[in-house]
Amino acid sequence: MTVPVLEARNISKRFPGVVALERVSLSVFPGEVLAVVGENGAGKSTLMKILSGALQPDEGEILLDGQVVRFTDPRHALARGIGIIYQELSVIDALSVGENVFLGRLPERPGLRGSVDWPRLWRDAARVLERVGVPIDPQRQVRELSVAQKQLVEIARALSQDVRVLILDEPTSSLSLQETERLFEILRGLRAQGVAIIYISHRLEEIFTLADRVTVLRDGRVVGTLPIGEATREGLIRMMVGRDLSAYYRTVRSSPGAVRLEVRGLCRTGTLQDVNLTVRAGEIVGLAGLVGAGRTELARCLFGVDPIDTGEIRVDGQVVTIRNPRDAVRHGIVLVPEDRKLQGLVLILSVRENITLPVLERLARLGFPSRRAEEQVTQSFVERLRIRTPSLEQRVMNLSGGNQQKVVLARALATNPKVLILDEPTRGIDVGAKAEVHALIAELAEAGMGILLISSELPEVLTMSHRILVMSGGRIVAEFSREEATEERVLAAATGHPVAA
Amino acid sequence: MDVRSPQQETVTAQRGRSEPEAAPVGTGAFARRALQRLTGLREFNILVALLVLGAFLSVTTDAFLTTGNLFGVARAFSLTAIVAIGQTMVILTGGIDLSVGSVLALAGLSTGMLLERGVPLPVAMLAGLGVGALVGLVNGLLITRVGLPPFIATLGTLSIGRGLVYVLTKGYPVTVPYDYQAFVWLGQGYIWIIPVPVVIMVVLTLLGTIFLGFTTYGRYIYAVGGNPEAARLAGIPVERVKLLVYVLCSTLAALAGLILVARLVSAQPSAGLGFELPVIAAAIIGGTSLMGGEGTVLGAVLGAAIMGVLENGMVLLGVSTYAQQAVTGTVIVLAVALDIWQKRRRARVRRARG
């Protein structure tokens, strides 16, 4: 048997009051993809930080090629061939691709310190990019690239330093299906070149298509490591959460009632073309499509964030004019935006202040909000949505991703909407929180709300929705009932190659 | 590579897991939290610094700890403090108002010129405040409608305002006729033993604190500064909030202008030249973050107070006027550096506590 290129033996790490990792062992061999899965807080990121030198273990050892090593910092680990790509990208927009790839190590003109050897930079960068299989011009500004391309630039940067172990932390959380597939091809290519890859993801679907083995962490311990052939989806979920999650995707039983939201002939130059749709009371309508198909743009128009050129929006049969989110909220439409940190939350405000934000005027007399009313509203949502927070006054920046997302949901629900638009409501949150969010969505529908669900996770759309609309190029190109819809059909419609029903 | 933010994320996630489902909010916890908040507050730190400074000056100089000197100091910094209240609100939304010095001069001049022409006092004063409000509205519209960055928009109105003042006065001061005793009282009078500008400052501090802390629009101001996009998506009238803070700030600057004219009994064309710097410094020393969303009116007023006391102390100690500026600058830098250092330490403790 070959020697693992990187091995962790009995790693323990404690933060005062919390055991983050408890005697964790794992190993990765050259030319394999090891997936590491677990809920948020299971210790994945802590483990990766230890492997890449950003944190030191309290106990245990790290072996590189069978030799015990101690990484003092990430640079040291990188110098020994261990690179890590974090979820939050660290490329510099204002610089070119080539400069980013060789950031901190720009080639200098011989004999002239401090002067960049540009021709050599472009040449070397092109070579690295080619190895990653990315046809990006090294002289392009990173600013002009898509998120997916930026990520590839970061991977190229890691590989330019002869990385033998590449760690990726949730790399696909903001990629489209196509981009994800492209990334996987590249990762498979690197695997074929003998690079060992440690891949962290919440998306089990991806693990089955990419990984060779999977290690499951729960509460800072390794629950088990399996070859992918022996793993099942349900089995992995059970290992991750320590219990069965039959409600992982909960189907709504209620049948749709009267039309709540009706959209006719909605157009916006450049993004939306003649969009027509209805959402009934108690109905979940899934909106599938590739990134850039116009789903988020549609949501923004319905919520009054972006203006529409032509078209008509009706809520409960009444034509409504929506010029801004304020109008939308007043007419009973509310949006849970795609990016909770950028668009959803005021991170420096408390749970209470975030949840009551849109209803503050209703809770106020003469412009003075009632503290007691605010606390009642917040407390009821904290209980109903099981938001885990030490207090109502906790700043939301200190909550976990899943709980932050619940705060955004609570805020939307506080407005008591008729139509709820959810844009990627479970992106980047862990399995447990996801199940809770799904159950909540189902409950809301059963209580008579009309729900428009945008999600890039097809299984989510397919199992949650009564009907699935597929968008492409700013229009709705297909509609499926829950029974008709399959991943293949939806994907085919989204990519413009309809499969006969 | 940035390793800090993901680290924070995991640890807080672990924290979320180890926390009880929803911690009870009791009165005991409230008292403890109140104490914790008090000692952790920037305002508390400045107050301590102010008291230490005061104690030092009381020991080293004879003149400092006298009623006359203390109220004199208070009157001197009250104008900075009054404008800093408005500036704080602007900075809270993530903006900045550089035009306050020009507004101060322009408003004072407007009132002074009207009084010179025999216009009734209430009308002249309202006109002065109105000029301030108008400039604020222009600032706000340039920022919300035209989309200019606040720095640029208010830099523009700073120049325009000052230019107008010089055009109107041709560089000569305008003298207020002495029969407006009520007006002069605004700048020179006392209520009991307290100078009127100080009383105005205290009242405005109170009103500002209530406004920011307890009203809907106060909360909106923090939300807009904390995350404008999220605020907009939450249905907050972001543009209206921004307009409001610029109008409030300029109106307060105008009020300071009127007080200054009343105090000097003349409107100087150079009044308030460079005034934006101490005003912004007061807000920042007071803990207002230039990123928006963090800060209080009380902090800004205390910030103005510490600069005022420092200046007074240096005069009493015979420090040269030239050196005074350098000391003031050092204090600004130190205050903010200390704050950052303390925040970092607290974040570490929080993370460590898990």
Image: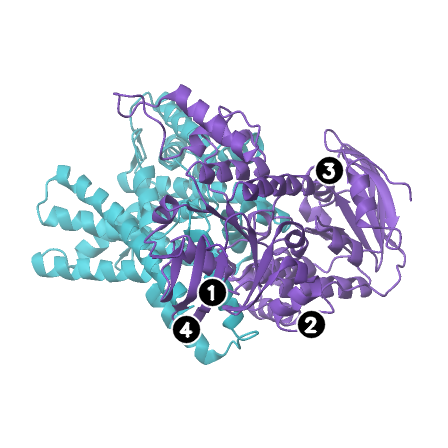
Amino acid type, label 2: Asp
Which residue is tagged 1?
Answer: A25
Which residue is tagged 2?
Answer: A244
Against B310, residue B260 (above or below) is above
Percent position (x, y) of residue A89?
50, 43
Q: Is residue B81 visible?
A: no
Percent position (x, y) of residue B13?
51, 63
Say whether marks 2 and 3 touch (CB < 8 Å).
no
User: How packed is label 3: few (under 14 Cα within 10 Å), some, or many (20 or more)?
Assistant: many
How many marks can you see?
A: 4
CA gap, disc 4 and disc 2: 29 Å
Percent position (x, y) of residue A254?
86, 65
Q: What residue is drawn where x is 76% and y is 33%?
A: A473
CA gap, disc 1 and disc 2: 25 Å
Which residue is tagged 3?
Answer: A293
CA gap, disc 3 and disc 1: 43 Å
Figure colour of chain A:
purple
Instruction: Return the residue nearer the eye: B275 or A164.
Output: A164
Q: What residue is drawn where x is 81% and y is 55%?
A: A465
Amino acid type, label 4: Gly
